[in-house]
Image: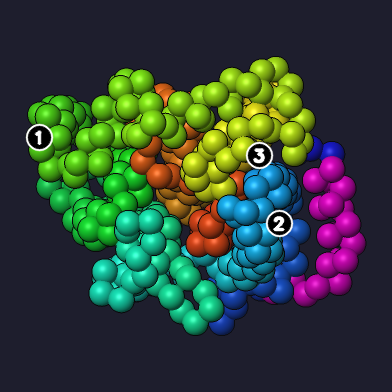
Amino acid sequence: MPPIFLNLQKIAHFWIGNLPNHNDRNPKLKWWTMFDRKFVQYFDWGLLGLAIVLGGIGLTTLYSVVTADPMTLEKTLYFKQMTWFFGGLVLMVITCLFNYKLLDRYAFAVYIFCLAALVAVLLFGKYAGGSKRWLVLGPVSVQPSEMAKLAIIIVLARYYSKNANTRGFTLRDLFIPAVLVLVPAALIIKQPDLGTALLLVIIAGSMTLFVKIEKRSLLSLMFAGLLAVPMVWFVLKEYQKQRILTFLNPDRDPLGAGYHIIQSKIAIGSGMLVGKGYLKGTQNALSFLPEQHTDFIFSVFAEEWGFVGCAILVLVFLLLIVWGLNVAYSCRDPFGNILAVGISAMIFWQVFVNIGMVMGLMPVVGVPLPFISYGGSSIATMMVSIGLLINVSMRRFTLE
């Protein structure tokens, strides 16, 4: 663990030194350990520090976006994101206070709640940008599809931890997980939000590979997937087909479908080695970058900080992902083990898809960059996810 986090841990130990150390065998205290000294002493300051660093980078980059072109983006976006970030920190702390094993018991309740929210979006959701993805709850708009990622991880962690076996899961065993994933994915596609739906499938696939699939079943799934690829083309909407064609050849429509990618590549390339400097990005200032506060915010960061800044940002993300996998590796509880793997996979695939998308290496599918892109639901989901990782980390050496 880095020295700065060790020092923070020592300070925490000083303040909690007089907390009572409850007897874990007491059934009344088995699930509620927020005042148990040994669990507080295991608090993972590294995960907290990485989340704060990434959140700080996101707020700093968003400030550059909103101040570069005040006619297009109001500065209220920055203050909204700051409010969500600090609110997310509160949610992270709350997530650490209860024993994560309660989620094992209530996993399907969480899943049903998220399904109900997705159905409510289709019935009562707010239209914005040609899609219906948000529920308006008073002054706040929430995006249930973001919460669905975490719900899928929790419910699959429960199913796989209860049904794991040494020979691996067969096609028959995977029928229930497939239904659990495809139902919310179908609801999200109806919004439409193909990127988030695909992300649900990829996260679920990563978790399934981790828990082991029987070799014959794995080969059958791979073969079926290859056969399904050509068929998918005929069910895509016209704008989705255009995105794929643009990915293959951005210059076919430089002022239309290819505009996003071309301008993003120009911004990233113009950053060169060390960037143009903070608040000095021209692509950003002249509003050449569409969606520069959400999906394409990495392009703004790359233009201002260059290759060196991007490499540091990617390394911070990599450290967070590896840290999460280390928590999974150290956890003795099957549910916590799979839960940590699922959260790490979610962060990895969102970073991979977003950066690949803005660099023109993948089709534009509208996946935000974790902790960096503007979006209250996204930052809240990420903070709760980190809170769950910290929760598992605090209790990973116990079996109670």
The residue indicated by pointer 3 is 285
Q: Is residue 329 visible?
A: no
How far separated are the C-alphas under marks 3 and 2? 42 Å
Residue under the image location 44 percent in, 34 percent down: 260
Q: Is residue 174 visible?
A: yes
Tell me if mark 3 has few (under 14), some (14-19) or many (20+) residues whose alpha carbon lies within 10 angstroms of its own. Answer: some
Instruction: Work out whether 257 lies above or below 90.
Output: above
Q: Nearer the viewer, mark 3 or mark 2?
A: 3
Residue under the image location 84 percent in, 39 percent down: 3
Label 3 element class: helix
Q: Do labels 1 and 3 touch, CB within 8 Å?
A: no
Residue 69 lies, in percent from the top left, at: 65, 48
Tell me if mark 2 has few (under 14), some (14-19) or many (20+) residues whose alpha carbon lies within 10 angstroms of its own. Answer: many
Please name the amino acid that badge 1 sits on: Met
Residue 43 lies, in percent from the top left, at: 71, 56
Q: Nearer the viewer, mark 1 or mark 2?
A: 1
The residue indicated by pointer 1 is 231
Total numbered labels: 3
Earlier in the chain: of badge 3 and badge 2, it is 2
User: Between 396 and 377, which is closer to the camera in this rendering?
Assistant: 377
Earlier in the chain: of badge 1 and badge 2, it is 2
Asked if residue 262 is among those painted magenta in the image, a careful observer would answer no
Please name the amino acid that badge 3 sits on: Ala
The residue indicated by pointer 2 is 43
How far separated are the C-alphas under marks 1 and 2? 49 Å
Residue 123 lies, in percent from the top left, at: 25, 74
* Residue 93 found in image quarter: bottom right
How far separated are the C-alphas under marks 1 and 3? 42 Å
Give, as a single range, the part of the protein colored magenta.
Answer: 4-22
* Residue 213 appears left or right of 126: left
Q: Do labels 3 and 2 touch, CB within 8 Å?
A: no
